[in-house]
Image (cartoon, helix red, strand yellow):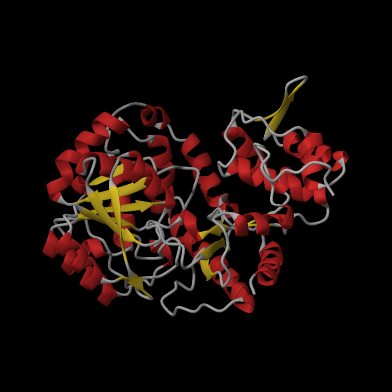
């Protein structure tokens, strides 16, 4: 037993003793890594003295020393002689190091890796472009909305997913998040309200908070957002917009069917909402799906990021917009973006025009299908509206956990997953879930191992 009582003793970090499993030093290191990378320990936080922490945990000092050493090697913490041990001030570098293969102690099933091992075709496209005699023309400030033939490629790619838009209403942006920023800063104002699903894309949640835009959660069912609930909220609140991910909703993996899309579009038109349609997973949807934007031709912004479908590293998105928004969005691009890298856009254009893009998404769909079949050996898909090719799955937790306790516990067992609080818009923890990525494990064997661990954790 510890010599001292720590019940009311202030410590900057108190790991949960119940979550420690052998070998203890690795378990402590995993918990410390989790709390640093997820923001529970701020940069430059002074950690408890090793002897004090060992006393608190009732373990040998050498065990704590070994745990701290692991985190120090990863760049998560640093020691100053005579002063103590601190959380590194450069957490971004620490995250990069922690994600590298040589430092990884757990199977990644939290972050959605878009099967980047299929990048051979992208690499070949880059090599082809490097040999072109007009390469230098891609390195200037001309064409802030994108070079005309890049926008033609964007138009062609959008047609593949059943959206017909003139190139005058298309802009090339620096990825989906950049598009969201442009849209929220040009078409909305602080204090405006945007309808969203109860659980939605965390980066959109944080961006809205940053811009002081209020997100209004709308209840849904197995097919997605409920039109009657949206209508009711619009009737009692002045909403300006709505954000939806209909092809494969993040995090629930629901594909909104055509009837529901039409019903939602009717409410958008009725109340004059601005639709922000995030179709990053369009390539996983049935080929006959029409975007919601098709049904609201004067009220849409359609964002087609290529991060998941073609290349996460190129940071390109195709953004289409209705005529009434053209002037404001163009102004925003001129003054916020200046210009998206034409070199990146050239790579994506090369992929689209050569047919390599079609080959890429075909390969990704096949891999994702296989991984979903593996998932179904261990878990059932309870909702028939879930996309069968989804890169991720949404599983209920049948037992109440704290906001981060399940994530921490899973990490000590060797897998990294995300708890539903990360995606939750309203303050309601009565239902809890986890999102697991099927595409981040490096191969099917690693995914199988991760799923076996998860199956043991879920009663």
Residue ID at (56%, 58%)? 402
| Left/right of residue 99 with respect to residue 51 in the rendered view | left
Q: In screen coordinates, is 127 left or right of 12?
A: left
**Is residue 9 depicted above or below 255 in this figure?**
above
- In this view, the residue in front, 286 or 351, is 286
In front here: 58 or 27?
58
For the residue pair 198 and 326, the one nearer the viewer reads as: 198
Find residue 11 and report its horizontal and vertical position in percent: 67, 37
Residue drawn at point x = 21 percent, y = 38 percent: 330
- Residue located at (56% from left, 61% from top): 437
Left/right of residue 279 with respect to residue 57 in the rendered view: left
Q: Quadrant of residue 411?
A: bottom right
The picture places residue 100, in percent across and down from the top left corner, at 67, 43
Total marks shown come to 0
Quarter of the picture containing the C terminus is: bottom right
Question: Above or below — where is 390 with respect to 121?
Answer: below
Question: Can residue 221 be seen?
Answer: yes
Residue 226 picture location, percent across and down: 28, 71
Query: Is residue 100 at least partly visible in the picture?
Result: no
Residue 335: x %, y % from top left = 25, 29
Tell me which residue sits at (22%, 47%) in the image. Answer: 192
């Amino acid at each position: 037993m510890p010599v001292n009582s720590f019940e009311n003793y202030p410590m900057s970090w108190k790991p949960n003793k119940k979550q420690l499993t052998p070998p203890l030093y690795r378990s402590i290191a995993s918990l410390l890594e989790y709390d640093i990378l997820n923001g529970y320990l701020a940069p430059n936080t002074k950690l408890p003295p090793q002897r004090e922490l060992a006393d608190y945990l009732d373990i040998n000092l050498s065990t704590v020393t070994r745990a701290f050493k692991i985190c120090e090697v990863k760049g998560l913490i640093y020691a100053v002689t005579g002063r103590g041990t601190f959380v590194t001030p450069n957490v971004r570098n620490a995250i990069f190091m922690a994600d590298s293969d040589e430092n990884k102690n757990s199977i990644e099933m939290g972050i959605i890796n878009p099967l980047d091992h299929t990048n051979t075709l992208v690499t070949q496209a880059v090599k082809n472009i490097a040999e072109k005699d007009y390469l230098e023309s891609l390195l200037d400030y001309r064409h802030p909305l994108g070079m005309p033939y890049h926008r033609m490629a964007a138009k062609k790619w959008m047609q593949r997913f059943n959206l017909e838009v003139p190139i005058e209403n298309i802009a090339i942006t620096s990825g989906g998040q950049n598009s969201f920023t442009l849209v929220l800063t040009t078409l909305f104002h602080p204090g405006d309200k945007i309808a969203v699903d109860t659980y939605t894309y965390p980066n959109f949640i944080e961006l809205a908070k940053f811009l002081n835009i209020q997100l209004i959660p709308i209840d849904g069912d197995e097919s997605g957002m409920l039109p009657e609930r949206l209508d009711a909220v619009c009737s009692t609140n002045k909403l300006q917009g709505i954000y939806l991910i209909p092809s494969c909703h993040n995090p629930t993996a629901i594909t909104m069917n055509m009837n529901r899309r039409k019903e939602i579009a009717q409410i958008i038109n009725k109340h004059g909402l601005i639709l922000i349609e995030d179709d990053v997973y369009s390539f996983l949807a049935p080929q006959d799906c029409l975007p919601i934007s098709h049904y609201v031709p004067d009220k849409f912004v359609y964002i087609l990021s290529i991060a998941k479908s073609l290349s996460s590293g190129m940071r390109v998105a195709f953004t289409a917009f209705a005529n009434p928004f053209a002037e404001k969005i163009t102004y925003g691009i001129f003054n916020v973006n200046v210009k998206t890298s034409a070199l990146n856009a050239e790579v994506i254009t090369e992929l689209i025009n050569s047919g390599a893009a079609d080959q890429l998404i075909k390969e990704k769909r096949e891999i994702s299908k296989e991984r979903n079949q593996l998932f179904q050996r261990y878990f059932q898909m309870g909702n028939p509206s879930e996309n069968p090719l989804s890169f991720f799955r949404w599983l209920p937790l049948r037992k109440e956990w704290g906001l981060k306790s399940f994530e921490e516990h899973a990490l000590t067992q060797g897998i990294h997953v995300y708890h539903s609080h990360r995606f939750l818009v309203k303050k309601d923890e009565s239902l809890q879930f986890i999102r697991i990525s099927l595409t981040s494990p490096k191969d099917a064997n690693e995914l199988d191992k991760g799923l076996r661990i998860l199956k043991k954790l879920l009663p």
